[in-house]
Amino acid sequence: MRHVIEQLQESKIREVANAGLGRSDVLAFWFGEGDEVTPGFIRQAAIESLQRGETFYAHNLGLLELREAISTYMSARHGPVGVDRLAVTAGGVNALMLAVQMLVDAGDEVVAVTPVWPNLTAQPVILGARLTCVPLAPVNGAWTLDMETLLAAITPATRLLILNAPNNPTGWTLSREEQQRILAHCRTTGTWILADEVYERLYFGDIEAENDPAPGRPKPGAPLGGEGRSPSGGDLCAPSFLDVAAPDDRLMVVHSFSKSFLMTGWRLGWLVMPASMTPHMGKLIEFNTSCCPVFTQRAAVLALQRTDEVTPQLVAHLKACRDTLVPLLQALPGVELSPARGGMYAFFRLQGFDDSLVTAKRLVTEAGLGLAPGEAFAPQARGWLRWCFASQDPQRLVLGVERLKNWLDAQRALRQA
Ligand SMILES: Cc1ncc(COP(=O)(O)O)c(C=O)c1O
């Protein structure tokens, strides 16, 4: 076995969840998915496809019908994105891996902004890359990127920069100006940008970070998109690298059906890339998954075409969940928390509890509360915990905070005794 595989760390989120296996009394908020089933009309499209007997291999890059639907959907938000720049993938995670396989050789230098969902940093390591992490920091109540530190880390030796915004777990979002600066710098160093934008629609756009000089201002001449309103409905969209880049820039953007369409178990996503790369991506997909199932792709076409029936309602609900959870957590003594601008997570620090893996395991066994430990996302997030607030019933969140409060009170009483 390769040494890097032997050395791969098991998911720390799983490690905590395993501590609660078989316990029905645990309120679980550890995984990055809601508890709502995929809308009926999307499931129905898959059923009808199966009933038509669509059980065969499909095109490596995805059904043309689906790529056309993705092109329409993306173009409405970010200006023209042609079918020739698209590949359908087996989820966002597969899109990320394909992009890294396409770009990174063993020994290459890769820079990633952290904390981040651990798969993004594990994948280049699996391929033998050398990884440098540039940490975000909470400044004046908002997660902030120190641009000078990031740009200094990206040199002509840097093959790939990996960013995820809106960010899992912090909810940090890049401003358009920051995207422009990063892109301009990467053009000079010849560095590829891999932008994970799977949460672009799960964007609330209502909290303005102090380092964001122009929140809400659309790019001159751009279609409605970015931090503007989508033309198809009343929904928002986070700033995207696609809004500032040229079609042939060294940029790959990752998307997923999981989050905005409640389709985590379907394993579908897509990649946007320069058109010259797409035929090569088809070859790479052949040797990874060959293709995605036809029946899931048929359902995905409907999801995109009828997004207005799903995503705006989902985002409104997530915002209500965030606004239920965050003030309750902030009211607890010793909690440090910056509300998320996007995504579906509250990321917070508990003063006096510096090892979040230990804390998360204790919360499971002693309080019946399931959270993800911060160190799953970056070593520097060791004192932090992630709470996924995508809950159909916001009362579950209230109940969860009560459990946390009671546990904290008990710890304090023990210390004073
Ligand atoms: C930042 C980020 N990117 C990508 C994904 C992958 O999503 P999927 O593989 O379900 O499409 C996730 C899932 O949690 C995520 O948080």
Image (spheres, rainbow, N blue to C red):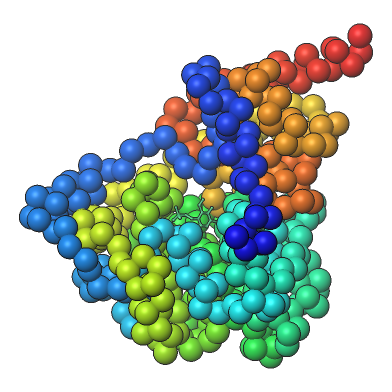
Looking at the image, residue 338 lies above or below residue 174 = above
**Foreground residue among 208 and 147:** 147
**Foreground residue among 315 and 167:** 167
Residue 69: x and y in percent read: 27, 68
Dividing the image into 4 quarters, which one contains the C terminus? top right
Dividing the image into 4 quarters, which one contains the N terminus? bottom right
Q: Residue at x 37, y 46 (%)?
A: 265
**Foreground residue among 393 and 131:** 131
The answer, for residue 212, to whether it is visible in the render is no
In the shown orientation, is residue 343 left or right of residue 107? left
Q: Quadrant of residue 74?
A: bottom left
Looking at the image, residue 417 lies above or below residue 34 = above
Total labels drawn: 0
In the shown orientation, is residue 105 left or right of residue 308? right
Q: Among all residues in the image, which is located at the extreme front? A: 1
Residue 146: x and y in percent read: 78, 66
Residue 94: x and y in percent read: 45, 62
Q: Residue at x 8, y 55 (%)?
A: 52
Looking at the image, residue 177 lies above or below residue 306 = below
Q: Residue at x 85, y 13 (%)?
A: 414
Q: Among all residues in the image, which is located at the extreme left? A: 52
In the shown orientation, is residue 130 left or right of residue 63? right
In the shown orientation, is residue 301 left or right of residue 190? left
Q: Quadrant of residue 356?
A: top right
Q: Among all residues in the image, which is located at the extreme top? A: 417
The answer, for residue 309, to whether it is visible in the render is yes
Residue 161: x and y in percent read: 65, 74
Q: Residue at x 67, y 47 (%)?
A: 376
Looking at the image, residue 86 lies above or below residue 30 = below
